[in-house]
Image (cartoon, rainbow, N blue to C red):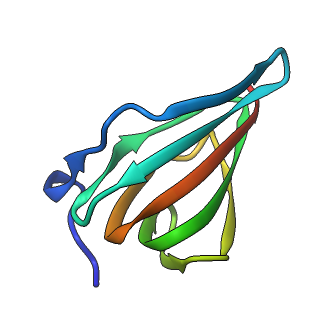
């Protein structure tokens, strides 16, 4: 399933789990159709870990991640997320 970023209903703000000089970790709880519109994290690296549910990750390519799967993303590139099923995503930003 590929959905245009304009179809994304903005997710509620994440729970901030940690903040350090080297990065931060955020927990997003998403309902189907919610997500994060296209954005960047210049000079950072993002690690996305799907804890439950299923999400579509749109960056240079589009991929679907299910619970237990992880993706690494260059924060200089645009990315958006869309929940295909309700769930939680742990996002760790390193640097930037």
The residue under the point 21% across, 54% down is 8
Total count of labels? 0
Horizontally, residue 66 falls left or right of residue 43, namely: left
The residue under the point 35% across, 55% down is 30
Quadrant of the rendering where the N terminus is positioned: bottom left
The residue under the point 43% across, 70% down is 55
Farthest-out residue, left: 7
Horizontally, residue 15 falls left or right of residue 10, namely: right
Q: Please determine whether, in this image, residue 66 is positioned above or below residue 40.
A: below
The residue under the point 83% across, 15% down is 21
Q: Quadrant of residue 43?
A: top right
Farthest-out residue, bottom: 1
Horizontally, residue 67 falls left or right of residue 94, namely: left
**Relative depth, front residue between 45 and 51:** 51
Residue 90: % across, % down? 61, 51
**Relative depth, front residue between 69 and 37:** 69
Residue 57: % across, % down? 46, 65
Quadrant of the rendering where the C terminus is positioned: top right
Q: Please determine whether, in this image, residue 8 is positioned above or below residue 85.
A: above
Residue 92: % across, % down? 70, 42
Q: Please determine whether, in this image, residue 47 is positioned above or below residue 69.
A: above
**Relative depth, front residue between 8 and 87:** 87
């Amino acid at each position: 399933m590929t959905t245009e970023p304009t179809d994304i209903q903005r997710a509620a703000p994440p729970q901030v789990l940690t903040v350090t000089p080297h990065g931060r970790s955020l927990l997003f709880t998403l309902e189907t159709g919610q997500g994060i519109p296209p954005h960047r994290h210049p000079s950072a690296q993002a690690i996305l870990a799907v804890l439950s549910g299923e999400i579509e990750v749109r960056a240079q390519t589009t991929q679907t991640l299910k619970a237990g799967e992880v993706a690494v993303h260059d924060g200089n590139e645009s990315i958006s997320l869309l929940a295909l099923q309700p769930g939680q995503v742990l996002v760790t930003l390193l640097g930037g």
